[in-house]
Image (cartoon, rainbow, N blue to C red):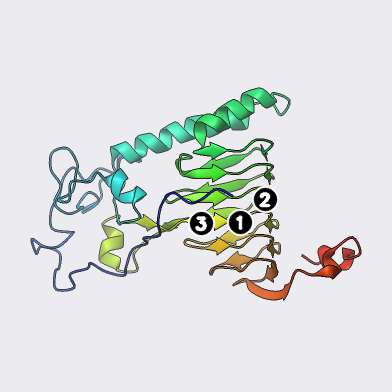
């Protein structure tokens, strides 16, 4: 199966230096630049107060906000990241508007949108994502209508995976600390879905979760923690109710109908 390309790195509840505070030169809230939200144009006090930022938009460690985002560290959305989203939106809107029978055209768009899109895979519209480039889909994957894949961090879907309608794969995280959250800090933790997993309709997978191969997640489940291989999990939060076994073969229709 495909391997993730970024590490987990969601935000901690507050700054690493607990002695710092807004107004303290050491504080990530102490410096400022243009505080217009690049998405809406609205003014947000502290939106762009992202730490020590030079004229190029880079922080003291020399990384751009995109580089911070892709490494799993806290970041604030800037114009480069907005441009990434607008590129993705143009592509998924084109995909959503392309007729089902234009298989070549649809695949061409997905090849451009995603980091990888495996041979024999199918994605049904509508589909929405944040950036697309952080999504990697294996071979022979089937994704039903309405997938939302928020790929602040990597989303890796293995081979032979089946995804039901209206599934949400959510990698973004936001600080519990109200000051950091108001300053528009965010981060992300990757999601990995193993080979031959089945996600039932309406499943929600939260940041940092890995689902092992051959596992089945029942419709409407909210997956908050890793799931092992070869199990059936249901509920909110999702819990393992049994292992996949012989009863799930051709004679296991009763089991399958309850998932």
Which residue is more in the foreground, 229 or 21? Answer: 229
Q: Residue at x 61, y 38 (%)?
A: 118
**Where does label 1 land, which residue?**
194
Disc 2 crowd, CA 10 A, few/some/many (<14, 14-19, 20+): many
In the picture provided, is 39 more to the left or to the right than 26?
right
Furthest-right residue in this view: 251
Residue 161 is marked as 2
Spatial separation of the CA atoms under disc 3 and disc 1:
10 Å
Task: State the SS at label 3.
Answer: strand
Which residue is more in the foreground, 215 or 53? Answer: 215
Which residue is more in the foreground, 34 or 154? Answer: 154
Task: State the SS at label 2.
Answer: loop
**Where does label 3 land, which residue?**
191
Q: Residue at x 48, y 30 (%)?
A: 90
The picture places residue 45, in percent across and down from the top left corner, at: 21, 53
The picture places residue 14, in percent across and down from the top left corner, at: 26, 69
Q: Quadrant of residue 33?
A: top left
Which residue is more in the foreground, 85 or 36? Answer: 85
Quarter of the image where the C terminus is located? bottom right
Residue 80 is marked as none
In the picture provided, is 57 more to the left or to the right than 146?
left
Q: Quadrant of residue 9?
A: bottom left
Spatial separation of the CA atoms under disc 1 and disc 2:
8 Å
Spatial separation of the CA atoms under disc 3 and disc 2:
14 Å
The answer to whether the residues at label 1 and label 2 have Cβ atoms under 8 Å apart is yes
Mark 3 or 2 closer to N-term?
2
């Amino acid at each position: 199966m495909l391997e993730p390309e970024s590490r987990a790195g969601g935000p901690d509840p507050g700054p690493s230096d607990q002695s710092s505070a807004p107004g303290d030169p050491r504080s990530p809230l102490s410096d400022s630049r243009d505080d217009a939200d690049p998405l809406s144009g609205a003014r947000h006090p502290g939106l762009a107060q992202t730490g020590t930022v030079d004229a190029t938009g880079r922080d003291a460690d020399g990384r751009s906000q995109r580089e911070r985002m892709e490494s799993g560290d806290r970041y604030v959305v800037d114009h480069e990241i907005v441009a990434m989203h607008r590129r993705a939106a143009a592509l998924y809107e084109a995909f959503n508007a392309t007729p089902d029978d234009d298989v070549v055209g649809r695949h061409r768009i997905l090849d451009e949108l995603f980091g990888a899109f495996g041979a024999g895979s199918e994605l049904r519209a509508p589909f929405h994502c944040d950036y697309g480039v952080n999504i990697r889909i294996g071979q022979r994957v089937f994704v039903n209508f309405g997938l939302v894949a928020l790929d602040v961090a990597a989303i890796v879907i293995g081979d032979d995976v089946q995804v039901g309608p209206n599934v949400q794969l959510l990698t973004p995280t936001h600080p519990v600390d109200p000051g950091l959250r108001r300053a528009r800090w965010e981060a992300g933790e990757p999601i990995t879905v193993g080979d031959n997993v089945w996600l039932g309709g309406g499943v929600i997978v939260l940041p940092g979760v890995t689902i092992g191969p051959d596992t089945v997640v029942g419709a409407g489940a909210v997956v908050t923690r890793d799931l092992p291989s070869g199990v059936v999990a249901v509920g909110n939060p999702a819990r393992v109710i049994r292992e996949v076994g012989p009863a799930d073969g051709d004679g296991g229709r009763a089991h399958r109908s309850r998932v």
